[in-house]
Amino acid sequence: MNVVKRIKSLVTITVVLICCSFMTNGASAQAASYQIKSGDTLYKIAANHKVTVEELKRANNLKSSTIQAGETLQIPTYVQHRIKKGESLYLIAKQYGRTVNEIKNVNNLNSDTIQPGKILKIPADSASVAVSSGSAAVVSTSRGGSYRSYTQSEWDMLAQVVYGEARGESYTGQVAVAAVVLNRMEDDDFPDTMYGVVFQRNAFTCINDGQYYLKPNRTAYQAALDAMHGTDPTNGCLYYWNPVTATSSWIWTREIQLTIGNHVFGL
């Protein structure tokens, strides 16, 4: 297996996205969810996800540090913004659709004074944020000491597959389809790039019938992003198909693991 093989738990996420048309002004910061396990503390969870305890508490409206196993926490996601000469907190906040106080709070700033060259963390909507053109678009995930980065182009491709293959499915079903694509990238029997997996011959119906080229909606982008964050409802499946419409006899040689909506998922 490659050193960048995906594992299921998210350790850290940094999102830096080029200007997207579906930004939501003033949306609250969201990210991957984490189910609390026995023995967990807020300090431990925060350290594992490279955020602070206060950021965790703020993202989950916690009044204290008391948590219970089985509950779910939202792990906040941030955009990194390098301050340019002439910028102010007001202009930066307006650019990202945040408030000055939100930015000050997450960066522990006591005044509005900022210095060019410094990095600010900006609370990010889980689907997208708009940043100045020319920035690289990357979702960089660290899992067990290994890294996988996704470009804006790869996010677009994954969202197009989700929309073309599963837009009529439940949200979980859409995330599952995205997860299968990513699972293939990490499996030695498939190409190790998004492009290679998506455009592998006869791999996805949406490529053959042209539905891949439809414009994805926000839900498809969100499902793709959640999968990139590490959410995998299929638990590692490499295949999915609609048992009602599937015409390939070979696909039925795969071992079915679960059913989500109109699709079965297998290995």
Image (tube, helix red, strand yellow):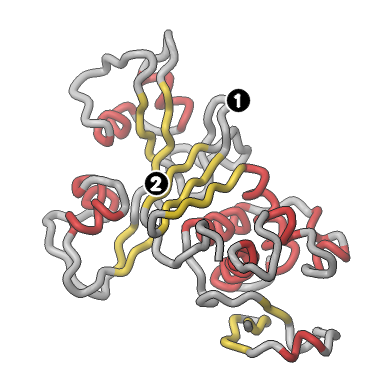
Q: Nearer the viewer, residue 243 or 118?
A: 118
Under mark 1, the amino acid is Gly
Q: Quickly name the residue at label 2.
A: 77
Q: CA distance from mark 2 to mark 1?
A: 21 Å
Under mark 2, the amino acid is Thr
Q: Which image quarter holds the C terminus?
A: bottom right
Question: Are there few (<14), some (14-19), or many (20+) residues within 10 Å of tag 2?
Answer: many
Q: Is residue 8 left or right of residue 102?
A: right
Give SS at disc 1.
loop
Q: Position of residue 252 (x, y in %)?
A: 75, 90
For the point 19% across and 46% down, the residue is 54
Q: Nearer the viewer, residue 166 or 246?
A: 246
Q: Which of the marked residues, 2 or 1, is nearer the chain's N terminus?
A: 2
| Image disc number at residue 5 | none
Q: Quickly name the residue at label 1.
A: 134
Dividing the picture into quadrants, the one containing residue 68 is: bottom left
Give SS at disc 2.
loop
Q: Is residue 163 left or right of residue 7?
A: right
Q: Is residue 120 above or below residue 41?
A: above
Q: Which image quarter holds the N terminus?
A: bottom right
Question: Are there few (<14), some (14-19), or many (20+) residues within 10 Å of tag 1?
Answer: few
Q: Position of residue 98 (x, y in %)?
A: 40, 33
For the point 45% across and 33% down, the residue is 97
